[in-house]
Amino acid sequence: MPKWTLNISSDEINSIKQRSEYTISIIGCKRNGILHACLFAEAGFKVMCVDADRAIVDNITSGRAYFLKREAKRKFKKHVKDGLLKSTSDIKSAVAKSDVILITTKATIDKKKRVSYLSVERVCKQVGSSLQRGSLVIILSLIGLATTQDLIKEILENTSGFKVGVDLGLAYNPISISDRQTLEKLEECRRTVAATDGASIKAASTILGTIAKNGIVKTSDAKSAEAAKLFESMQHHASIAMANEFAIFCDKAGIDYLKARELAETNGHNALALPTLTCSNAHEEAHLLLEEAENLNVKLRVPAAAGETSEDLLKHVIGLIREALRDCRKTLRRANISLFGISQTSNTRTAPRISARRLAKTLETKGAKISFYDPYLSKKEIANLHYTFSSNLTDAMKRVDCIVILTGHKRFKRLNLKKLKILARMPAAVVDLASVIDSKKVEKRGFTYRGLGRGVQTK
């Protein structure tokens, strides 16, 4: 029977044994959910991962979480084997047996860039219908302003029949999970816990304090907490957008962006971001902010421009590939192009980049033949992309006209250019969007080189 978590004190969960008496359900088990599941299981809680996707549930049951790094993966498998971490697709059953419910479900953005909370509403209704009196709900996903205390609170109270702050705890703990987020980094995050009532703040801070190494910041101003995370996320996207624009400028001006970045750092300037190929889907947080601004009749020019920059960079990358092939006396039409490194994070087994699919589709419409290669992914894991996948490096290099490196895996730094020269349809090109290969070595072997922001290489 679930406990009265709303009034929990730190003395009640000081030890692993005490924590093992509490069950935490995590609704939505992609990266955000799995990382939190690992942290809470490591802290000693019983964890139930809940997801409507049967494939995700089956992976968790089998101890598989492809984006976790070695040590985190070992911990994850151990907790699954020990029965501390379980999974199910039955949300109502899991919630009914839980003391704490973490919700990672996000708002979605449609093709017209409109924000929809239908998925969040659906999950909250399911959660509310099975909540036990005294339980605690914590929202972990980035959401629009006042969503926690207006939309989510209303749904939970109406479906459960409980009152927040009296029978039920509701708090917001905004965490921005990027594709580079790791278990170690998440542990080091200084967390902000927001709620409009003192009981919810205290309970959420107590629970989250067991996994937060750098402490908790408490606030009763949930709206400001929601805004703070949106601002933080938007600043990150804006810095990448600016780096992408600088890269385009450097390619046109014959300047090496990496060299300019290095010099800026030696002059005491904060580190400039590295340019990277993204797409509009990577800026969901920006759309949340832009919609809020539109409702207030306020123009947020920088967030809007950041999304446009990603479109410009895609066109620029196509231009780099076309130019490299032209130097090989070839055209995009009928060119065999292999995209190397399509996982989201370097040196890690993570889901394929959305931008990889976007680039492949654009190249294909221009007549190119596209294939993928990634040493960390299998053919099964990219089956939904519907492109040829090379299972090994040798096959990936056969009869290519151009190799495009998207993700900077360390293995690509040691790319066997001598072997590539034998297997490729020479003359051939290497377009390095991750700046992992020595351009001089590439050109010395007789290849045409292009790099993102590496305007000094024009052979």
Image: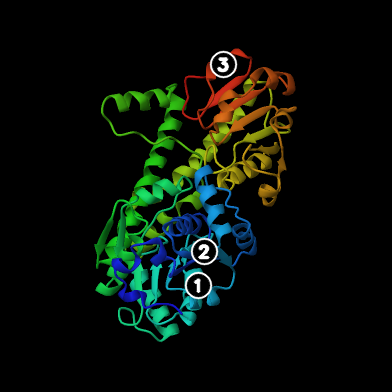
- Residue 427 in view (yes/no): no
Point out the frontmost of discs 2 and 3. 2
* Residue 400 place in picture, x, y as percent: 71, 28
Q: Are marks 1 and 2 in contact (CB under 8 Å)?
A: yes
**Gap between marks 2 and 3 measured at Cα:** 46 Å
Q: State the residue at coordinates (50%, 30%).
A: 452
**SS category of the residue bearing label 2:** loop
Residue in the foreground of this view, choosing between 12 and 25:
12
Label 3: few (<14), some (14–19) or many (≥20) C-alpha neighbours in 10 Å = few
In what quadrant of the picture does the C terminus appear?
top right
Q: Is residue 307 above or below residue 275?
A: below
Q: Is residue 161 above or below residue 327?
A: below
The amino acid pointed to by label 1 is Val
The amino acid pointed to by label 3 is Lys
Q: Is residue 164 above or below residue 292?
A: below
**SS category of the residue bearing label 1:** helix
Label 2: few (<14), some (14–19) or many (≥20) C-alpha neighbours in 10 Å = many
Q: Is residue 152 above or below residue 206?
A: below
Q: State the residue at coordinates (42%, 22%).
A: 255
- Residue 183 in view (yes/no): yes
Q: Are marks 3 and 1 in contact (CB under 8 Å)?
A: no
Q: State the residue at coordinates (32%, 60%).
A: 209
Point out the frontmost of discs 3 and 1. 1
The residue pinned by badge 3 equals 441
The residue pinned by badge 2 equals 28
Residue 418 picture quarter: top right
**Gap between marks 1 and 2 measured at Cα:** 9 Å
Residue in the foreground of this view, choosing between 207 and 221:
207
| Circle number at residue 123 | 1
Q: Are marks 2 and 3 in contact (CB under 8 Å)?
A: no
